[in-house]
Amino acid sequence: MQIDSRLLDEILEVVERPARYVNGEWNAVHKRLDEVDVRVLLAFPDTYEVGMSHLGLKILYYILNQRDDVACERTFMPWVDMHAAMRDKGIPLYSLESRLPAREFDILGFSLQYELSYTNVLAMLDLAGIPARSEARGADHPLVIAGGPCAYNPEPVAPFFDAILLGEGEEAVGEIVDEYKRARRESLSRREMLEVLARVPGVYVPSLYDVEYREDGKIARIFPTSPAAAYPVQKRVVRDLGAVPFPDNFVVPFAEIIHDRIMLEVFRGCTHGCRFCQAGMVYRPVRERDLDDLCELARRLVTSTGYEEISLMSLSSADYSRIRELVSNLLQRYSGSGVAVSLPSLRVDSFSVDLAKEVEKGRKTGLTFAPEAGTQRLRDVINKGVTRNDLLEAVRAAFAAGWQAVKLYFMIGLPTETEDDLAGIVNLAREVLACGREELKRGHTTRSPQVTVSVSSFVPKAHTPFQWHPQAPMEELVAKQDYLKRRLRGKGLKLAWHDVKASFLEAVFSRGDRRLAAALEEAAALGCRFDAWHEELRFDKWQEAFARSGVDPKFYANTHWSYDDVLPWDHLSAGVSRDYLVAESRRAAEGVPTPDCRLGKCVKCGVCPQLKVAPRILARPVEGVS
Amino acid sequence: MERNALSSPGKPQATCRLRLTKTGPARFMSHLDFIRAAERAVRRADLPVALTEGFHPHPRMSFSPALPVGVESECELIDVDLRESPGADEVARRLGRALPPGMRLVSCMVLPRGGPSLSSMIRAASYQVDFGRDNVAARPDVIEAAIEGLLRANAIPVSRTTPKGTREFDLRPLIYDLRLLRGDGAASVHMLVAAGPRGHVRPDDVAREIARRAGLGPGARPARIVRKEFYVEREGRFRPLL
């Protein structure tokens, strides 16, 4: 059953940015839905512009559509005006490609990128006419699954999903589709189907586990209730990225999206081991793509998309061991043809600035560095292997090369932080500014340097050494922001900060358990959605939702948990061992850094033996490069 | 290192004038989106396009005036400077395979270098406005009366709100022709309005004014507006540019 296309077209005449709701973008895949066995709808719980900028979605769309027996389409959370209009006119959530209602698909796959998109998941299910809770769905509803970084602690949304994939999807999605087909062929019941899926490595079926709580509210135990349920569920990891497909074409949207360019993933994983960073822990080990493969992919993507920019993506692209060759190769090939190369993430060192200098040429808008903490002591605590000298050297190189604006990322509320550390942020920013004045003067320009300090609030994340740490109470974070606001003033200095309410909610859900599902439902019922959008966040409604559902959000965000506590995600494994996380947490308390395993010495994080994988680094590190 | 066809700036040898549609899903693109989409299509088509100078060279292309979001067109004109001319047929063949839905190549001609630019020539544009079969109030005779009233008016003040503020101007002298198209019951209007140095008329402004005078209510919107043609002025008369 199609939706009423004429009615939809009428709405499109009046909503903001209608181009994000229509089909037919270049490279979009249109298949005859009655000619495939399985119809998959990839659902991104944020706007089209955000979702279409996400590489994982492009990869899965490509891989699934390569199969003749599968049609994979896309849907996104309609923006506020469109959402209201669709509800008003009775238009359900639909797929872009075929304008088919979401509930007509076999599998609905949500991408969970950040906790503040959870209410959008509920809003989308509601708009689709699909019951939110897995237990309320039957044979005539799609299988609702999820993946993405939030899968490493999906407990607050666990009751909403039939299955959740931990880790990388390139190989697992195909297995899920195969098992789904088999279950349907054998006319298995919903429960039997979920048990079949639970046997796919990396697939977590929340309904096959039970949680018992202690009187003090902490978790007593988490245990499987079916022999099909693994304990723990181990994340999926692709051993060799060159052996799995990477899209050689991207959908090119009609209207501009956030990352409107070719995203070339140069490697996956990161070995720096920053103790607050979930990505650095859960995407291990480092796996670099071959240089030739990357050049060939770039060529095919330029031809198939017509994009004018190639962005070299990863958690820290300057770490790619053959980055110089890659950059010069791409520049040589494309510099004369109007196709630019860009590096989105820079390390704090002059090597990175040199690279940026090479690729950015005239477009010197601003460079961003992330020292994360204001003093060496705190940087050692968080294992950010960056010194004051590294930073000053990097910014000096940047100003000398003609950049005039520098952005510095810091976090406040990190474990062990004192006022000295905040003062350290102020001092570093002033030193960077002074350095800029000196260099720009030396360069005989009349321009003055601009230093923007951007502070975010520490959010403890599952599977990191800081997972036991509380987030600082909101009042304290506000006081820290005020401290910085008072001192980071004056010509050339700018301060940007994040809303502490949003950070608080993020902390609640990042360490949350299943009891929070009720709060999410209450919040959604009260109209909360787009919580990640500052102007849309309704904190008063959230407080009401917590009160109504009888959960204390501070228990999750602001309580110190002990090493002995059962954590909500103890049945889920990212491969990094608990012993390593405890050891790292203790080293943090002592302010002892842990070196990068890329330098040769294994840090015993447990990933390689546990997942039977190995880091894949093309070239040995060169002096001064790593 | 191999160099593909678009990899050197070079001096332009020829200009290729394209006429594209902007219909269906493409009507929702903003002008900036349309420019980007055309540049990307040209790159996909691997045309030997000349590039601008500077650090960030991009294809040397110029466009006919912007179209409001939602309005369709049968005559989006684009001049593309080429380093060498593969011939109009070849350009059309390559580009035909590289355009997204709604952007269809209508015609393609290679011009000698040094001719006048689109913006220096364009003086007027024509549009067709369909008021739609469903809009019972928009009977042809009602619309015709509204048009006549509008043409008799001495001035038609219109205000436009931009980020820079609200601006008032008189639409009347910029409307050159307005007439009802005899069709099969639905009211359609043909309009010829200024585009270029004397002013640029938004077709939806005129359509709204007609709807207002026809008593269709403030929220009434025509079912469809299509840009049909661009005009130059020669010997005091408007003639189609292509």
Image (cartoon, rainbow, N blue to C red):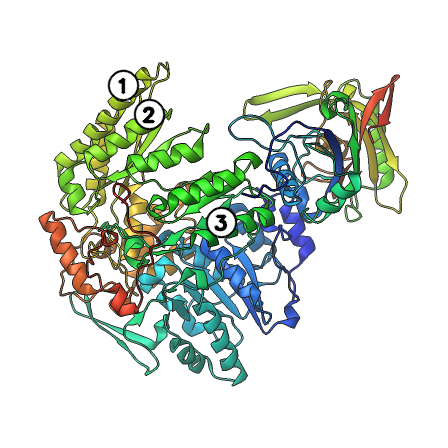
Q: Nearer the viewer, mark 3 or mark 1?
A: 3
- Amino acid marked by disc 2: Phe
- Could you tell me how far apart the alpha carbons at marks 3 and 1 are, in whole angstroms? 40 Å
Query: Which sits in the foreground, B136 or A332?
Result: A332
Numbered marks: total: 3
Query: Which sits in the foreground, A83 or A605?
Result: A605
Mark 1 or mark 2: whose residue is earlier in sequence: 2
Mark 2 or mark 3: whose residue is earlier in sequence: 3
Q: Secondary structure at mark 1?
A: helix
Give the residue at x 59% y 26%: B161
Q: Which disc, if any, is residue A295?
A: 3
Snapshot quadrant of residue A452? top left
- Amino acid marked by disc 3: Cys
**Is residue A92 toward the left or the right of residue A424 in the image?**
right
Q: Which disc, if any, is residue A399?
A: 2
Q: Which residue is mark 1?
A: A438
Viewport quadrant of the N terminus of chain B: top right
Viewport quadrant of the C terminus of chain B: top right
